[in-house]
Image (cartoon, rainbow, N blue to C red):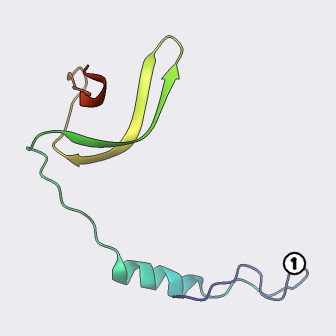
Amino acid sequence: MVAVSAKPGGPESAAGSEGIQELVEALRANIELPERDPNGLFSFAVDHCFSVRGQGTVLTGTCLSGSMKVNDTIEIPALKV
């Protein structure tokens, strides 16, 4: 836990923020970058899906494994597409 305050003393106070550098250091010390194999099967966790008129469906999310290129075909098992 890291104590952070954007405006200690309230909105009228002239004091700056507190604890931001400690928060950054704690995040850097505890975060792990995941490793993925770009040559494996493509797997994608969908965060958001929406339609763009005249363009089609847009999916945003995180590539868990594999990779894809422009014009690659993907399969969406839940929709049997």
* Residue in the picture at 27% in, 41% down: 44
Instruction: Give the quadrant of residue 30.
Output: bottom left
Q: Quadrant of the C terminus?
A: top left
Position in image of residue 11 (x %, y %): 87, 78
Asked if residue 19 is positioned above or below residue 70 in the image, the reply reads: below
* Residue in the picture at 23% in, 20% down: 71
* Residue in the picture at 48% in, 80% down: 24
User: On the picture, is 40 further left or further right than 76?
Assistant: left
Of residue 57 and residue 17, the one placed in the foreground of this image is 57
Which residue carries the number 1 mark? 11
Q: The disc labelled 1 sits on which kind of residue? A: Pro
Position in image of residue 72 (x %, y %): 20, 23
Residue at far top of view: 54
Disc 1 element: loop
Residue at far left of view: 39
Instruction: Give the quadrant of residue 74.
Output: top left
Asked if residue 30 is positioned above or below residue 53 in the image, the reply reads: below
Number of callouts? 1
Of residue 50 and residue 22, the one placed in the foreground of this image is 50
Position in image of residue 6 (x %, y %): 71, 78
How many residues crowd around disc 1 within 10 Å: few (fewer than 14), some, or many (20 or more)?
few
Position in image of residue 5 (x %, y %): 69, 83
User: On the picture, is 55 further left or further right than 81?
Assistant: right
Residue at far right of view: 12
